[in-house]
Amino acid sequence: MKDVKKDFESFVNDPAETAGSSFVLSKIHEQLQKELPSAWAVATKLGFAHLLGSFVTLMSCSQFGVQLFFDGGGLMHYFMKISPQFCNVFCGALYLSISFLMARVILKRDEWLMILRSRVLSISTLALVSLGGLALVSHEVTFEAGLLWLFGAALGGELVTLVKSPTLWLAQKTSKK
C-alpha cells in the first residue's frame, strides 16, 4: 500500500503539466472522498460498540458498584482478592478493551483504520466519558480509584488497538503450539 501512495505522490508532484492531469487528479480526489467513511458514522459505531461492551462488562463485573445483572461480586470478587488497586486497574482495562474488541468486530476495515489514526483521542474520549458516567451513577468513585481505573482503561484500549487483526493473531498463536 505504501508503494501506491508513493506512486500517487510522484504523479501529483510531476512538473509536466498536461491538459488532462488536473481533471484526472480531481476525479481521483472526488472518488477517494466518496469512499472514505464519515467521521460521525465511525464515532456513532464506536459509541454503539462501547454500549455493547459496557453491557457485557457490567454483567460480569460491578464497576464501582454499578452492576446490571446478577447479585454478588462477580469478577470484582476475584480481583479484590489480589488488591483493590489491581481491581481498579484491571476493571478499567477490561471495560475498555471489551469495547474496542466489539468495535473491531463491528467496524469495517477503513473505519477501523480511522480509529487507529486517532487512537489516543478515541481511547481517552471513551475512557473519560465512561469514568464520568460511572461517577455520576456511583458514589464509590474516589480520586485514587478513578485515576487507577483511567490508567487501566487507557492501557487496555491501547493493547487492543495494537493487535492488527485479532483472528490473525489467534491463528498465529495456535499454529505455534
Image (cartoon, rainbow, N blue to C red):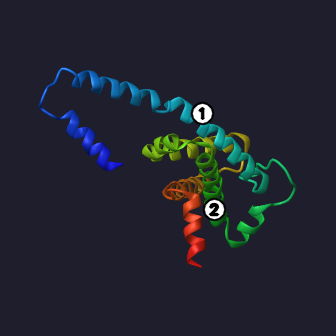
- Does 64 appear above or below 22? below
Query: In whole angstroms, how far apart are the C-alphas of marks 2 and 1?
Result: 26 Å
Name the disc covering residue 100, or none.
none
Name the disc covering residue 44, or none.
1
Q: Amino acid at mark 2?
A: Phe
Q: In front here: 51 or 134?
A: 51
Q: Position of residue 76 (x, y in %)?
A: 74, 62
Q: Residues within 10 Å of mark 2 (few under 14, many from 20)?
A: many
The C terminus lies in which quarter of the figure? bottom right
55 left or right of 37? Answer: right
| Pointer 2 residue | 90
Q: Residue at x 86, y 54 (%)?
A: 70
Q: In front here: 47 or 130?
A: 47
Q: Give the mark, 2 or 1, whose residue is nearer the N terminus.
A: 1
Quarter residue 20 falls in:
top left
- Does 168 appear above or below 57? below
Q: Residue at x 55, y 77 (%)?
A: 176
Q: Position of residue 53 (x, y in %)?
A: 68, 48
Does dot 1 land on a helix, a strand or a loop? helix
Q: Residue at x 77, y 56 (%)?
A: 60
Q: In front here: 42 or 6?
A: 6
Q: Amino acid at mark 1?
A: Thr
Q: Position of residue 132 (x, y in %)?
A: 62, 41
- Does 152 appear above or below 4? below
- Does 35 appear above or below 128? above
